[in-house]
Amino acid sequence: MLAGNSIGKDFRVTSFGESHGKLVGAVVDGCPAGLALSEADFQSELDRRIPLQLKIVSGRIEKDRVEIVSGVFNGFTTGAPISITVENKEADPSDYEAIKDLPRPGHADYPAWFKYRGFNDYRGGGRFSGRVTVALIMAGVVAKKLLSNFGVEVLAYTKAIGTVKMHKTLSAEEIRERRYEAAVRCPEVRCAEEMEEAIVNARKEGDSLGGIIECLALNVQAGIGEPLFDSLDADIAKILMTIPAVKGVEFGAGFKAAELKGSENNDTYRMQHGKVRALTNNAGGILGGLSSGMPLIIRAAVKPTSSIAKEQRTVNLRRMKDAKIRVKGRHDPCVVPKAVPVVESAVAIILADHMIRAGVIPKVLEGWK
Ligand SMILES: Cc1cc2nc3c(=O)[nH]c(=O)nc-3n(C[C@H](O)[C@H](O)[C@H](O)COP(=O)(O)O)c2cc1C
């Protein structure tokens, strides 16, 4: 895995580490100097990463302790690359020995074996594991702290699990306050109970579920993005598609816009208190690859976890024969709850990058000491 592990131009994030290796880490290069940053900023985010509800998550509960290795001095970022790591302490490779020649249907095992000729670390999915997303979460902590100094907030939450969808549209305040109340990370409490039940039932059947994560970005000023190929929506879609199990991304009305007429889909403008306002937000806050000044509304579709206990057909790569597989070990029956902070972090990373590129965030933050 040589190239392809970095994203962003002026705020550049590099991810490293595997599921069952020594540690997982991120390097953030290009973060402005002068941002107050401590290990406690990361710890609170890592502490709430895994819902402590064993019914709906895998048994691998890593009590992550973050270490800032470089780039912070006297409590402030210095402008040098910031490296942050967490150790893997709960890795258990034993479940993977039995199936190392049997690629799990729906997982990255077969294409990874083909590309790297078996040299890749297959334990726990190696580089393709959800564990690696901790790097995005840690870089996201830096991005979110930077954005908050410029009034921008990013909020992700669970919108649907399988066929159970949120019934109500909640305000940003309600989402902010309640999204971490339920283990499934859905701020509509009654709906969260139904979602949890659906996950528990799928797991009992040896199966799994997917879902939809919605992410809002508030107070993003108009004009952020670098058309054509570094358009804001293009860059957000790219980072979200790197999250394991994310299979679709949409903005605003998204795929539903294809069924609407122009007169229904257009967000018409009015003057309000001397400012241009759109009355609706089918565009999801991005037009022409530039932020429109409306809230960003982004959705990521997450597929059902591929590692399931039900028997499935596969092949034995050593014998080159048909085979059967039942995936044992510690797997999330639904990865959506754990992916919520990952989506939030990913969107924050792209916004931080583009706001620096636009000159809205300066390279040195003055006057905050
Ligand atoms: C936070 C998180 C946790 C995950 N946990 C699991 C898991 O326990 N078992 C599994 O089979 N896949 C899990 N995945 C998904 C796989 O890593 C992913 O499906 C696989 O790498 C193939 O990539 P693709 O689905 O994007 O094509 C997880 C993903 C995320 C984001």
Image (cartoon, rainbow, N blue to C red):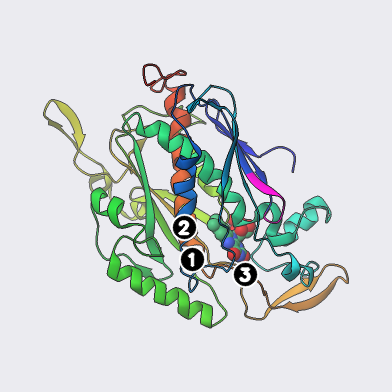
Q: Are marks 1 and 2 in contact (CB under 8 Å)?
A: yes
Q: Is residue 21 left or right of residue 178?
A: right
Name which of mark 1 and mark 3 comes first in the sequence. Answer: 1
Task: Assign the N terminus to one quadrant of the image.
Answer: top right
Q: Nearer the viewer, mark 1 or mark 3?
A: 3
In front: 38, or 118? 38
Say what amino acid the circle numbered 1 marks.
Gly
Name which of mark 1 and mark 2 comes first in the sequence. Answer: 1
| Residue count near mark 3 (Cα–Cα under 10 Å), binned few <14, some 14–19, many ≥20 | some
Q: How far apart, in angstroms, are the residues tagged by discs 1 and 3?
A: 17 Å
The x and y percentages for residue 70 are 61, 30
The residue furthest right is 319
- Residue at image mark 3: 330
- Residue at image mark 1: 210
| Residue count near mark 2 (Cα–Cα under 10 Å), binned few <14, some 14–19, many ≥20 | many
- Residue at image mark 2: 301
Q: Name the chief secondary structure element in magenta.
A: loop
Q: How far apart, in angstroms, are the residues tagged by discs 3 and 2?
A: 23 Å
The x and y percentages for residue 138 are 53, 42
In the image, which residues are magenta? Answer: 19-24
Q: Secondary structure at mark 1?
A: loop
